[in-house]
Image (cartoon, rainbow, N blue to C red):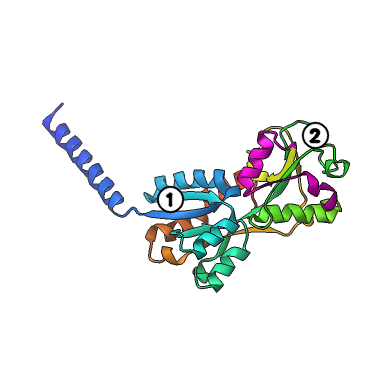
Amino acid sequence: MKNSEVAVKRFLLSLAASLAMAFSAHAGEVSVAVAANFTAPMQKIARLFEQDTGHKATLAFGSTGRFYAQIKNGAPFDLLLSADDDTPAKLAKEGLAVDASRFTYAIGKLALWSKQPGLVDAQGQVLKSGTFDKIALADPKLAPYGAAAVEVMTHLGVLNTLRPKFVQGENIAQTHQFVATQNAQLGFVALSQVMADGRLVEGSVWAVPATLYSPLRQDAVLLNKGQGNAAAAALLQYLKSDKAQAVIRGFGYEH
């Protein structure tokens, strides 16, 4: 290799190292409380976010109600990605979040799902036939998807009949696990948990009509701790990007 080529190669390596150092110097970290139903899409978005910006998102998943209580007690989160729009609004009203930062990042869909093929019919009539021992749902006091499930059963007139068969998860992730392990024959989950690329992963499902429950508008909000954090501001903006929205739609959410 000629001396000139060696010099050019060294220059390019030096430039790449300098750019990497500059990129790293401006990179930050953001701590995010994420509604359990949004686990899979947020894990993917966080990877893309780090690749594209250098910022790292540290994620915690759980029920919105539990996160609300933790934030009230001083939990060190920068952002909340809620499973509803009420909780971020409440936190802003209570002076714990920045009201102007709130926006809807996804609209969730409720599904009745069983790991067993053929158990859940396309109209949800299985709820009225009651041909199962246990039905799982997220705790309606903590999880908006659980509250939506109660709305559906109330609307269909089966709530009191099915109540003795309830198996409650603390959040929608635990609820999905109950059905996936067949500790409950079926259960109300987020459609995003059982669909991939627009197709059912396994089992049988009823995509519950949106007319049977209140809209699951999922809002993001900047918490007080996140003010002045460039990584937090960047992630809020990134959630609105075409790349993030494509991921969100791919998991069955609307926007």
Q: On the image, numbered disc 1 is attached to which residue?
A: 57
Q: In terms of sequence position, does the residue under pointer 2 or pointer 1 come before the other? A: 1
- Residue 145 picture location, percent across and down: 68, 53
- The CA span between labels 2 and 1 is 39 Å
Asked whether 7 or 56 is in front, the reply is: 56
- Residue 66 picture location, percent across and down: 57, 56
Q: On the image, numbered disc 2 is attached to which residue?
A: 119
Residue sitting at x 62%, y 49%: 171
**Amino acid at dot 1:** Ala
Residue sitting at x 62%, y 63%: 85
Indicate which label's residue lies in the foreground, 2 or 1.
Answer: 2
- Residue 125 picture location, percent across and down: 86, 43
Say whether marks 2 and 1 touch (CB < 8 Å): no
The residue carrying pointer 2 sits among few (fewer than 14), some (14 to 19) or many (20 or more) residues within 10 Å by Cα, namely: some
- Residue 195 picture location, percent across and down: 66, 39
Magenta-drawn stretch contains 234:
no
Secondary structure beneath disc 2?
A: loop
Q: Which residues are magenta?
A: 160-185
**Amino acid at dot 2:** Leu
Residue sitting at x 52%, y 47%: 42
Query: Quick one: which residue is furthest to the front in this view?
Result: 164
Question: Based on the displayed image, in which of its 4 quarters is residue 230 positioned?
Answer: bottom left
Asked whether 53 or 184 is in front, the reply is: 184
User: Is residue 220 visible to us here?
Assistant: no
Question: Based on the displayed image, in which of its 4 quarters is residue 83 positioned?
Answer: bottom right
